Image (tube, rainbow, N blue to C red):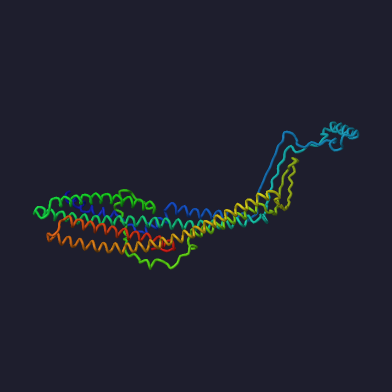
Amino acid sequence: MKGRLVMILSLLPVVLTAQSRSVTLEDCLQSAAEKNAYVRNAGLDVLSMGEMRTEARWSYLPSVNASAIGYRALDPMLKITLGDILGGSDYAHQLNYDLSSAAYEHGIKPYYESLLYGYTVGITAIQPLYMGGRIRNANRLASLGVDSAGIKESVIVREIRDSVENKYWRVVALQEKLKTLDSTGDFLDSLVKTANGAAQAGLILDSDLLQLRLKCSELESGRLKLRGAVKLAKADLFNTAGIEYTYLELGDIVLSDLPSGLPAPEDIIRAEESAAEFDESRLLTMQVEAQQLRKRMAVGEYLPQLALGAGYGMGDLMGRGEMKGNAMAFVTLTIPLTDLGKAAARSRRFDYEIQKARNEKTFLDAQLRLQMAMYRLAVETSWEDIMVAEKAVGVAEEAVERAIADFDAGMTGCTDVMQCRLSLQQAMEKLTDSRMAYRKAASAYLHRCGKTL
């Protein structure tokens, strides 16, 4: 029994290690492209606009309608006597009297009545020939909507990609800071052991040893908070990327990509960027065109409308028990003669909307150029920050080596070594932040140019 227990305990670390999993940036991007709610909804918008375009194309086809009607009245709706036909003359009254007498004698009615019941069914087809250009412009507007939805989908995909990358590298940055903090903690723990012996030998003051232990406690508290921040940042990343997880396994999920191998700015920045290349600029161009099409459709309501139609029907409206059918062809021409002042006002209103769209496009193009300049500046300055931070790390490492040598030689106290090591920690964290800032700026710039880092 004891041997089996030892075997189980020896296999436990292997089982726990097997439960951990590694997630790359590409995994997060691929998952976001498939599972992110905003990306999926953008794809549905494209499909919806495609159906709207199909719906608009049906307007080119004839409009076919089938109808049926039946009725039953309490009394016949049509009743005609001989007096109704001949009038009210004496001769007519005499003739009507003779006819009524003969009718009662032979058991027939002296009048004609109809429309007591009846029915009819029919089908009508109307082919629009000219509707003021509204059908053509509606189809163009629907096609424009499909293109616009596709560009909006690209914008959303880019924004989600930016968000996923930023959140991924934020987690990586926190992990790197945690490694730096762990390394500093291990260093100070080792320094505490050495300082304990030196204090016992009377080589350093107890107050120095107390400050060292206090700093170790602060670092341990910082590590606990940072581990919690890493878990929350992972949860935020996985929510955006659509990756399933549980809170208990957050600590076992490892982001494997490291912030290394960054290209220099001269390998990223292009010589010139045109605002017309950006999706947002193309969307506003489409907005101007859409307003122009809406204006044409509005004006088309006041233009002549021409349609060709045909119909066929059959039934027994008179209630005679005889089914009869008939067909006809017809042409309709509608020329609006009123509301011309309203049409002119509507046209001017759309002109204002078109001008507003043009003004927005002009302003946005300028803003996009400014934004690209800001991205370029961010790439250049963050790269310079990396260079400065790397030099600072080198200086801090040299200071730590000298402090350790002086401490071993008894020329300095443990607090000086501690301060030098903490300065190195701050320099390394600054380097990590500079690398993350550069990667974020470079990714934003390249995504605007349709490329990836």
Which residue is rendered at x = 29% and y = 60% of the image? 431
Q: Residue furthest front?
A: 411
In this orientation, which residue lies closer to the viewer: 373 or 180?
373
Determine whether, in the image, residue 404 is placed left or right of residue 273.
left
Residue 72 at x, y percent in the picture: 71, 37
Label total for image: 0
Residue 43 at x, y percent in the picture: 48, 55
Determine whether, in the image, residue 143 is placed left or right of residue 84.
left
Residue 126 at x, y percent in the picture: 68, 52
Vertical placement of 231 versus 81: above or below? Answer: below
Q: Residue furthest left?
A: 201
In this orientation, which residue lies closer to the viewer: 428 or 157?
428
In this orientation, which residue lies closer to the viewer: 277 or 417?
417
Which residue is rendered at x = 26% and y = 59% of the image? 427
Determine whether, in the image, residue 216 is placed left or right of residue 280.
left
Residue 313 at x, y percent in the picture: 71, 48
